[in-house]
Amino acid sequence: MTELVLTTYDWVPEFPRGFVRDIRAAWALEEAGLPYRVESTPFKDRAEEHFAHQPFGQVPWLTDGDLSIFESGAILMYLGERSEVLMPGDPKGRAGVMEWVFAALNSVEMATLPWFFIGMSPENKTGPGWTFIEGFLKVRLDRLEPVLAEREWLAGSFSIADILMADVLRTADRLDALADYPAARAYVARATGRPAFIKAYADQMAHFARED
Amino acid sequence: MTELVLTTYDWVPEFPRGFVRDIRAAWALEEAGLPYRVESTPFKDRAEEHFAHQPFGQVPWLTDGDLSIFESGAILMYLGERSEVLMPGDPKGRAGVMEWVFAALNSVEMATLPWFFIGMSPENKTGPGWTFIEGFLKVRLDRLEPVLAEREWLAGSFSIADILMADVLRTADRLDALADYPAARAYVARATGRPAFIKAYADQMAHFARED
């Protein structure tokens, strides 16, 4: 078996710490008990080699021998195929996980991420762009809430879909996105209470503090 | 082999025609030569059964016997696993497709979709929300352009990643998002010139016109 190496920045400012997307991969790796090593790439001067691994100049990417893969969603699918703890192997079980993986990233995060970055500055909460994104977020969370009220996890048992959805929601909830959504908030608490998340979170905090 | 059934709305207003997301699935099905049937669900009164298949009340969903799957990204992954025309079967080839599938939906469409819906009304192009989303779109397209200038298709040969990326880009280009990105525009022309896209597009236009 080849060695899994997860690459993230060497340092980030305080605000994003605990929320940089390598945590999604580290959380999955911890859940599955797959051994891995974390490497760093400069945050401040992003070299050509960075863009060769991640064309948008972001993190993380994962290498597995001579294979290199970027996008947290793709990395989690890749890991999901290596561990039944992360994703069932049968077509029906896989389909159930995949639909929620994409729902987390293409239906929910598509609303939460712009909402978060615009809303981070209270003076930005004005104008038609804000009106649109607020409405977009509400439509998505209104629909997600009854689903989360009925289920412990999105696709039967805990899976990569829950890692992605919980990470998307907890980030948005830094600005109280879930104030009116108790089931979503309980779901985030359930997910982030897992030992694998707690370890991945502590590791990321320690990693970014090292270069302070 | 069970029958593949793709469900979309029975009707939509004229503006979204040719751009409703069932076209992504139909395009993939046509590329792979997989037989399928299209069914309709009401656009105007969305029933409980609709939400049972698609919790956000959108389309499409795909059924394959007793399996039902939503999210265009997940449907394309599901079909990709059924045809080497859509996604290679080896881990390295799959990884190369998956990273671009997620890049299309979680890095590029996350910018293009809010940009499109806000920018659709010219009077909305003002305020901090618009400033954010315009900058977000530019960052993504600036990075994508050199990639598309160098490759015919995103992951070696044509794949589901190209269906998703081309669909994301052609939608944004209805509002001239690609005016300064000639390689992206050439890529969209290359992708949408394929017989499978042309058939899927004509079929969708005819489907939605039927109930006028």
Image: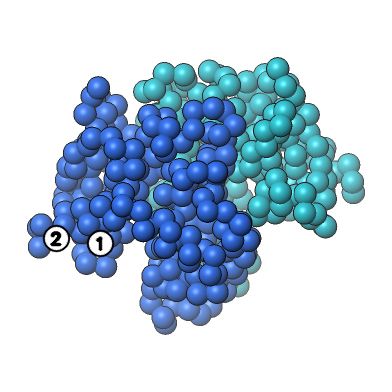
Chain colours: A cyan, B blue
Q: Mark 1 — residue? A: B17
Task: State the image quarter where residue B71 is shown.
Answer: top left
Chain letter for the residue marked with disc 1 in the picture: B
Residue A20, given in percent of the width and then of the height, sits at 69, 45
Q: Is residue A40 left or right of residue A132?
A: right
Q: Is residue A195 left or right of residue A14?
A: left
With respect to residue B38, does A131 lie above or below?
Answer: below
Q: Looking at the image, tell me whether mark 2 or mark 1 is earlier in sequence order.
A: 1
| Residue nearest the observer in this picture, A179 or B10 | B10
Residue type at the position of mark 1: Arg
- At 23% from the left and 42% from the top, the residue drawn is B7
Q: Mark 2 — residue? A: B209
Name the mark on residue A190.
none
Residue A186, given in percent of the width and then of the height, sits at 51, 35
Question: Does the image show residue A84?
Answer: yes
- At 46% from the left and 49% from the top, the residue drawn is B162
Q: Is residue B144 left or right of residue A202?
A: left
Residue B113, given in percent of the width and then of the height, sits at 44, 61
